[in-house]
Image (cartoon, grey):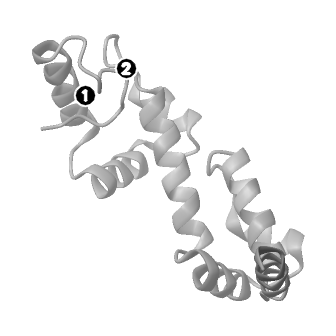
Amino acid sequence: MLTLLEEELMRRLCETAGLGLVRHTSSVIAATSGAVAIGDLSVAAGVSSTHLAQRFKGLVGVTPKRLARTYRFAATVFAINPAGPIDWGDLAGGAGYFDQAHFGHEFRAFTGLTPTRYVEVRRRFLREHPGHALDGWPLPAD
């Protein structure tokens, strides 16, 4: 009975329109930590940006641009070492942000904090909770 159920589910999965396109696009986004132009992905796939966004949103729940932004931001936050000095311009450029203002806007959109305030909160958390289980995690509890 389980074999029949698995076969039916696999058949339905294979019939999902756009699944291959979404899988490929999301794997490229993940592999580049979000530092990829979505327009380039749609051109490479031979589909319009609108078609790609619709398929992606329907199957994943967010657009490929939103997923790329999330990956890029996560990679950036993990790259921050709160114990040392931070060159925000280098960090922003290395993550693929257009400029430091773009980086600051994205940072605030994701965290509600400026990058400087975020690091202050992380440093305070690390001082107040040495050896805490969240010590290696990028997002502080405030």
Q: Amino acid at mark 2?
A: Ile
Nearer to us: label 1 or label 2: 1
Write the residue at 81% across / 64% down: 24
Q: Is residue 98 visible?
A: no
Give the percent coordinates (x, y) of residue 98.
53, 49
What residue is disc 2 on? 86
Image quadrant in which the N terminus is located = bottom right
Write the residue at 25% across / 12% down: 131
Write the residue at 77% across / 87% down: 16
Image quadrant in which the C terminus is located = top left
CB under 8 Å between discs 1 and 2: yes
Give the percent coordinates (x, y) of residue 80.
41, 26
Q: Is residue 141 left or right of residue 108?
A: left
Q: Is residue 44 visible?
A: yes
Task: Look at the picture and state if 104 lies above or below 58.
Answer: above
Tag 2: Cα neighbours inside 10 Å, few (<14), some, or many (≥20)?
Answer: few
Give the percent coordinates (x, y) of residue 26.
70, 62
Q: Secondary structure at mark 2?
A: loop
What is the number of the mark on residue 85? none
Q: Secondary structure at mark 1?
A: helix
Give the percent coordinates (x, y) of residue 6.
79, 76
Tag 1: Cα neighbours inside 10 Å, few (<14), some, or many (≥20)?
Answer: many
Q: Amino acid at mark 1?
A: Val
The residues tagged by marks 1 and 2 sit, at their Cα atoms, a distance apart of 9 Å
Write the residue at 17% across / 26% down: 120
Q: Is residue 119 left or right of residue 50?
A: left
Sooner in the amino-acid sequence: mark 1 or mark 2: 2
What is the number of the mark on residue 119? 1
Task: Look at the picture and state if 58 lies above or below 115.
Answer: below
Q: How many marks?
A: 2
Q: Is residue 40 left or right of residue 76?
A: right
Q: Say which quarter of the image contains residue 138.
A: top left
